[in-house]
Image (cartoon, rainbow, N blue to C red):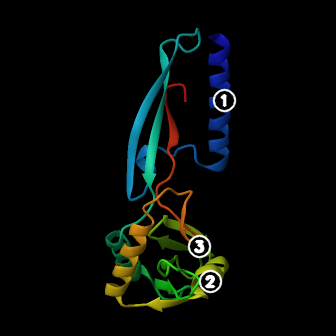
Amino acid sequence: QSMLTNHLVKCLDKRVRDAKSTGEYDIGIRTLTGNKVSVKNTRAFNFRGSEAMDESVLVYSVEIDQGMSSDTALKLYDEAIQADDSRGQIKTGFYIDRRTLFKQCPPVYLIISMGRTSPNAVVVRPNNGRNCHNIPWIKDRFIQPSSRCDDLVKVRQMWDREFALADTDSDNAYQMWSFGRQRKPIYIFGGQIV
């Protein structure tokens, strides 16, 4: 039992060190975002050693639907348009990929400028929510093969269609380069020892 406890503490220590070095140490259940975040299971590991009397580590199994609904995307768009000074390297708005290689539906993107001095912008998708990327990559990957769409009714319809298609596991592609929004469970450690 002592060997098992020591192994668990060493593994936990390594995970904490790795999380601290990548800046993810303070990520907790409350800071996870997505269409839906839910705790599915909680386990407790209790310690009775001389250094950690009556201490426990809680392990939360958390499931995340990382997608974003059209209502949330349109709200984000409204907020971004009001804050946008229109002098950034990228124009905030919705973009639709018109290439014919997408058989299910054309992908729709919300691109949000982070200002004229930022080297990055935010890309929002129905299947994986909000992500920050550098501007040259965004221009090459999203803006160049796409056209801007200012018809918000059309955007909502296309967003809802892709959001429904993306309701699958994140390991499954529902069409080329587009993966589902349901992530495998992640595990979050908590407790006095951590």
Residue indicated by mark 3: 176
Q: CA distance from mark 3 to mark 1?
A: 37 Å
Label 2 sits on a secondary structure element that is helix
Q: Up-down: is 8 above or below 178?
A: above
Q: N-terminal of the two: label 2 or label 3? A: 2
Q: Residues within 10 Å of mark 3 (few under 14, many from 20)?
A: few
Residue 105 visible? The answer is yes
Front position in the image: 184 or 60: 184
Name the residue: 44% across, 47% down: 63
Q: CA distance from mark 2 to mark 3?
A: 19 Å
Could you say where residue 153 lies in the image, as x and y percent from the top left? 31, 86
Q: N-terminal of the two: label 1 or label 2? A: 1
Quadrant holding the N terminus: top right
Q: CA distance from mark 1 to mark 2?
A: 41 Å
Could you say where residue 70 lies in the image, as x and y percent from the top left? 35, 73
Judged by depth in the image, the label closer to the viewer, 3 or 1, is 3
Q: N-terminal of the two: label 3 or label 1? A: 1
Residue indicated by mark 2: 139
Q: Residues within 10 Å of mark 2 (few under 14, many from 20)?
A: some
- The amino acid type of the residue labelled 2 equals Lys
Name the residue: 55% across, 85% down: 90
Q: Are marks 2 and 3 in contact (CB under 8 Å)?
A: no
Label 3 sits on a secondary structure element that is loop
Q: Residues within 10 Å of mark 1 (few under 14, many from 20)?
A: few
Location of residue 139 by image quarter:
bottom right
Front position in the image: 157 or 95: 157
Location of residue 160 by image quarter:
bottom left
Q: Which mark is residue 11?
A: 1
Q: Up-down: is 148 above or below 6?
A: below
Name the residue: 40% across, 66% down: 68
- The amino acid type of the residue labelled 3 equals Met
Q: Are marks 1 and 2 in contact (CB under 8 Å)?
A: no
